Amino acid sequence: MFAKEIYTGTKEENYGTLTYQLEHLVKDEPNRIANLANASALLNQFLQEINWVGFYLLEGERELVLGPFQGLPACIRIPLGKGVCGAAAQKGETIVVDDVHQYPGHIACDAASNSEIVLPLRDRNGRLIGVLDIDSPRFSRFDEDDVRGLNRFVEALSSYL
């Protein structure tokens, strides 16, 4: 599910290459927003069948605020515990939704989205600072390989935040 022809290995190998590229892209940049912007651009460039990828950042203790992203304009503020992003942040765990229309309390920012994966984002000290949100117009777009690969991607990114 990668757009570039350089990704010709297994899905696991492709995620490894993607994470390697991320590390070299952000390793010398101390600015969190710049690194998140490049990470969302990198994911948008290489993942197929997605229509939105970006970050929501924890503001205070009760809500997420829109951060760097690629895609159509999005919801700006999401309370913790609300929607997929708020639930993933509150629980501190990855959530995969095969059909967002069946998810209770789903917040629809883009009517074209049908599936979603949201991963907690932590800083280098392990503190929750937000979530990575990826939407797809395809139902059941994200599988266990995506969960493992994106978790490794987010873990690598966390060491630069």
Image: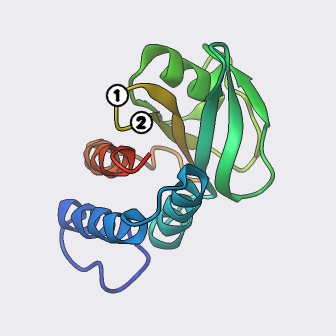
The answer to whether the residues at label 2 and label 1 have Cβ atoms under 8 Å apart is: yes
Q: Which residue position is annotated with label 1?
A: 126
Q: Is residue 125 left or right of residue 161?
A: left
Above or below, comparing residue 20 to residue 50 in the picture: below
Residue 143 quadrant: top left
9 relative position to 89: left or right: left
The secondary structure type at the circle numbered 2 is loop
Q: Residue 113: x percent and y percent?
A: 66, 46
Q: Residue at x 60, y 22 (%)?
A: 86
Is 129 placed left or right of 101 in the picture? left
In this view, 28 is above or below 6? above
Q: Quadrant of the N terminus?
A: bottom left
Residue indicated by mark 2: 123
Q: Residue at x 53, y 65 (%)?
A: 38
Q: Quadrant of residue 66?
A: top right
- Near mark 1 (Cα within 10 A), the count class, few <14, some 14-19 or many ≥20, is few
Residue for point 27% across, 48% down = 152
Q: Is residue 11 visible?
A: yes
From mark 2 to mark 1, how far is it between C-alphas? 5 Å
Which quarter of the rendered picture does the C terminus lie within? top left
Please provide percent x and percent y for residue 82: 66, 17
The tally of labels here is 2
Q: Position of residue 114 (x, y in %)?
A: 61, 43
Q: Tell me the amino acid under the disc marked 2.
A: Asp
Residue 28 screen position, x and y as percent:
39, 66
Q: Which mark is residue 5?
A: none
Q: Is residue 113 above or below residue 118?
A: below
Q: Secondary structure at mark 1?
A: loop
Tell me which amino acid carries mark 1: Gly
